[in-house]
Image: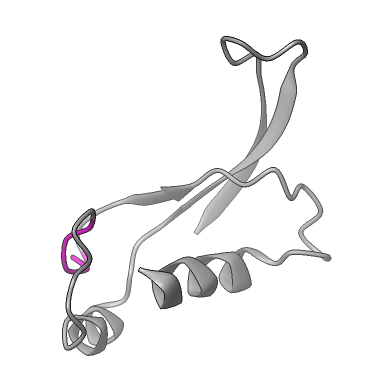
Amino acid sequence: MAASLLTLHPVGFPQEVQVRVIEYRIEPHTAEQLAEFPASQTSNHPDPRQLHRKVPTLLDPLQAPARELIGCSHERS
């Protein structure tokens, strides 16, 4: 897992936005467990070879640890 900060200036936004970029892969045994759940219409079943990216605006890793953000997004998928 890797994380870095990035500043973006999205079209239509009046100012720049700082985000955190979190890159990770799902462990094979976790992918197998997640594959038991139905995939949503907008997502595929987890693939341990696939690189995933989360781009939250929560910048403080102590306040919002990467593992918690990753876990939350896979729980709601």
The x and y percentages for residue 75 are 43, 77
Is 46 one of the magenta-colored residues? yes
Is 19 one of the magenta-colored residues? no
Which residue is located at x 31 percent, y 51 percent? 51
The x and y percentages for residue 25 are 35, 62
Q: Determine whether, in the image, residue 38 is placed left or right of residue 8.
A: left
Is the C terminus in the top left, top right, bottom left or bottom right quadrant?
Answer: bottom left
Q: Determine whether, in the image, residue 39 is placed left or right of residue 6.
A: left
Q: Is residue 71 above or below residue 51?
A: below
Which residue is located at x 49 percent, y 59 percent? 1
Q: Determine whether, in the image, residue 77 is placed left or right of residue 45.
A: right
Q: Is residue 13 above or below residue 32?
A: above
Which residue is located at x 81 percent, y 54 percent? 60
Can you tell which quarter of the image residue 55 is in?
Answer: top right
Q: Is residue 63 above or below residue 4?
A: below
Q: Start and end of the magenta stretch?
A: 43-48
The x and y percentages for residue 15 are 77, 13
Count of picture labels: 0
